Amino acid sequence: MLTETPAIRGVVRRFNKHVLNPAMMYLAGRRHWYAAVMRHTGRRSGRHYATPVVADRVANGFIVPLPYGTDVDWLRNVQASGAAAVSVGGHTYDVVEPEIIDSATACPQLSPGRQRVFQAFGVKKFVKLKTDRS
């Protein structure tokens, strides 16, 4: 897959972070839209951030694909705090216990359509977040 080349993946990542993600924030998390919003707190700054992601509801929580790998700011923030909030489909859920999982673990929990999309884009890592029941 073309995006597996580190240089190309970096260009796509920067474009998404500075151009596409700000535009996506207008629709992310709303009903009838595929993108969700991950709300998290900066691990060093303590600032509140919102990042558009794809979040699929599964038993006891959500699975979020990591197309850019595990070294992304929003994920490191969530891992540091152990908690975040996911807005999806017009609802917001508190989530805890981020766990990095591979595609062999994630895909059986996802719909066949999602599996095909994530496999086509070469997504190898995911994060599973449990819904906070406290």
Image (cartoon, grey):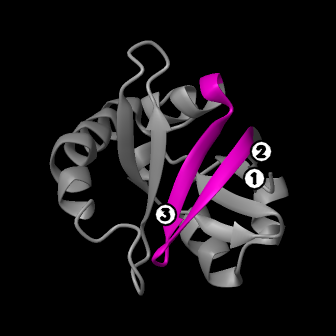
Task: Give the residue drawn at x 41%, y 87%.
Answer: 32
| Residue 74 drawn at (x, y percent) | 47, 35
Q: Which secondary structure lies at badge 1?
A: loop
Q: Position of residue 1 (x, y in %)?
A: 47, 53
Is 18 contained in the magenta span? no
35 sits left or right of 122 in the view: left
Left or right of 122, for residue 18: left
What residue is pinned by disc 3?
A: 87
Between marks 2 and 3 in the image, the one whose residue lies nearer the viewer: 3
Q: Amino acid at mark 2?
A: Ile
**Residue depicted at 60% across the width and 55% down the height:** 64
For the record, the magenta segment spans 80-98
Marks 2 and 3 in Cβ contact (< 8 Å): no
Q: Helix or strand or loop: what does disc 2 sit on? A: strand
Q: Nearer the viewer, residue 114 or 53?
A: 53
- Disc on the earlier residue, 2 or 1: 2
124 to the left or right of 15: right
Cα–Cα span, label 2 and label 3: 21 Å
**Residue hosting label 2:** 101
Q: Residue furthest top?
A: 44
* Amino acid type, mark 1: Asp
Quarter of the image for residue 78 reads top right
Q: Residue at x 26, y 42 (%)?
A: 17
Q: Is residue 7 above or below residue 108?
A: above
x then y, percent, for residue 5: 41, 37
Which class describes the residues within 10 Å of circle 3: few (<14), some (14-19), or many (20+)? many
Is residue 113 or residue 74 the one in the foreground? 74
Q: Residues within 10 Å of mark 1 (few under 14, many from 20)?
A: some
